[in-house]
Image (tube, rainbow, N blue to C red):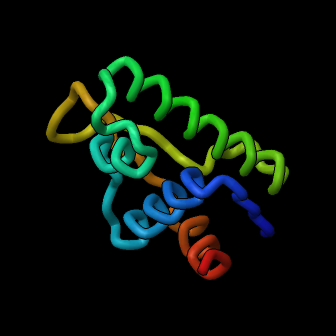
């Protein structure tokens, strides 16, 4: 499926999530904050920006592919229940990995 992500920050985040999913890992909040450039900002700003970027990526994915599935999934961290980790469907990750240089 063709996926175009023109925004460099969004593209970097998708690539990082794809890579971590292929490696059977999850991407944590700290790493996402670094990628989107808010790691030194107040926590409320980090949360708002992270949410906005992920929503935009999921919207773009849905519009581009016609899928009702979200590209980026969030789930509670198994070790730290107060925080989340992020990943994507493994099949989608392998497909995107082939398409994205």
Residue at image point 78% right, 49% down: 67
Q: Position of residue 25 (x, y in %)?
A: 31, 61
Residue at image point 76% right, 46% down: 62
Q: Is residue 63 above or below residue 3?
A: above
Viewer-closest of 94 and 48:
48
* Drawn side of residue 29 relative to residue 1, left or right: left
Viewer-closest of 100 and 93:
100
* Drawn side of residue 71 relative to residue 36, left or right: right
Which quadrant of the figure has residue 29? top left
Residue at image point 62% right, 71% down: 96
Q: Position of residue 26 (x, y in %)?
A: 33, 54
Residue at image point 34% right, 52% down: 27
Q: Is residue 13 above or below residue 55?
A: below
Q: Residue furthest top?
A: 44
Q: Position of residue 76 (x, y in %)?
A: 31, 34
* Drawn side of residue 33 relative to residue 62, left or right: left
Which quadrant of the figure has residue 2? bottom right
Q: Position of residue 81 (x, y in %)?
A: 21, 29
């Amino acid at each position: 499926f063709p996926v175009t992500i023109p925004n460099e920050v969004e593209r970097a985040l998708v690539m990082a999530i794809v890579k971590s999913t292929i490696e059977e890992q999850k991407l944590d909040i700290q790493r996402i904050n670094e990628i989107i450039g808010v790691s030194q900002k107040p926590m409320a700003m980090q949360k708002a920006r992270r949410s906005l970027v992920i929503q935009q990526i999921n919207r773009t994915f849905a519009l581009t592919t016609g899928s009702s599935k979200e590209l980026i999934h969030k789930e509670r961290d198994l070790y730290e229940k107060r925080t989340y980790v992020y990943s994507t469907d493994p099949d989608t990750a392998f497909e995107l990995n082939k398409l994205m240089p």
